[in-house]
Amino acid sequence: MNSRNPDHSLLQLLQGLLDLPALDLRTALTGATTQVASWLNCDKVDAFLIDERRASLVAAGTSRTALGERQKSLGLDVLPLANGGRIVGTFQTGTSFATGRSDLDEDELVGMVRDLGIRSTINVGLEIGGVRRGVLTVASQQPDRFGDDDASLVELVARWVGALAHRAELVEKVRAEEGAAPG
């Protein structure tokens, strides 16, 4: 099954990610997740990053989609590590996970299935500056939405998203240093 948007090639997606302005982390990740959601024709894409203070994964970038907005309104954009679930599991192990039947998965968070209606998902570790700092997650309300090669492609895309996030963090750091420099 080819779930990707026929009007956008992988090369176009990667070029689009490269062209995104990296002015700040949240803006860069929101732009990236929105492009990935469009490319995959899916309901939602998130870039969850670890927030050590809160012992949670927090969606630092969520696609501008109806399901992305619903997730935020329900508070499902913050995932305490203690609650587990497939996204947390991917973060903790670094092992990618894909399923077309989240509704039959006892290890998935109830809110993802019941409140968001997620049926298909791909979760991939998100490395920034060579360190696993989160998870790129792709979701659809349609069962068996993604094809066999989609997980591998999302792993590749996650590397580009991680590079974009790293660039955004470096820009933020330079700006902070310039603002702190004596005038």
Image: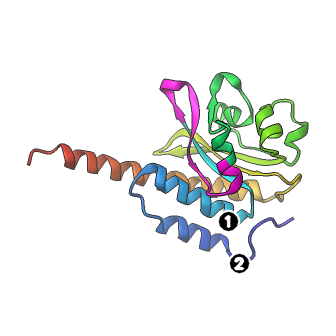
Instruction: Provide residue 24's location: percent of width, then percent of height.
Output: 40, 52
Q: Is residue 108 visible?
A: no
Q: Which residue is depicted at the point 65% across and 37% down?
A: 94
Q: Which residue is depicted at the point 34% across and 49% down?
A: 172
Magenta stretch encompasses residue 59:
yes
Badge 1 is on which residue?
Answer: 38
Q: Considering the numbered disc 1 on the image, is that residue within a helix, a strand or a loop?
A: helix
Instruction: Provide residue 26's location: percent of width, then percent of height.
Output: 48, 49
Camera-nearest residue between 156 and 21: 21
Query: What's drawn in magenta, residue-wise?
Result: 50-69
Magenta stretch encompasses residue 139:
no
Above or below 58: residue 2: below
Label drawn at residue 14: none
Is 102 left or right of 5, judged from the image as shown? right
Q: Residue furthest bottom?
A: 7
Badge 2 is on which residue?
Answer: 7
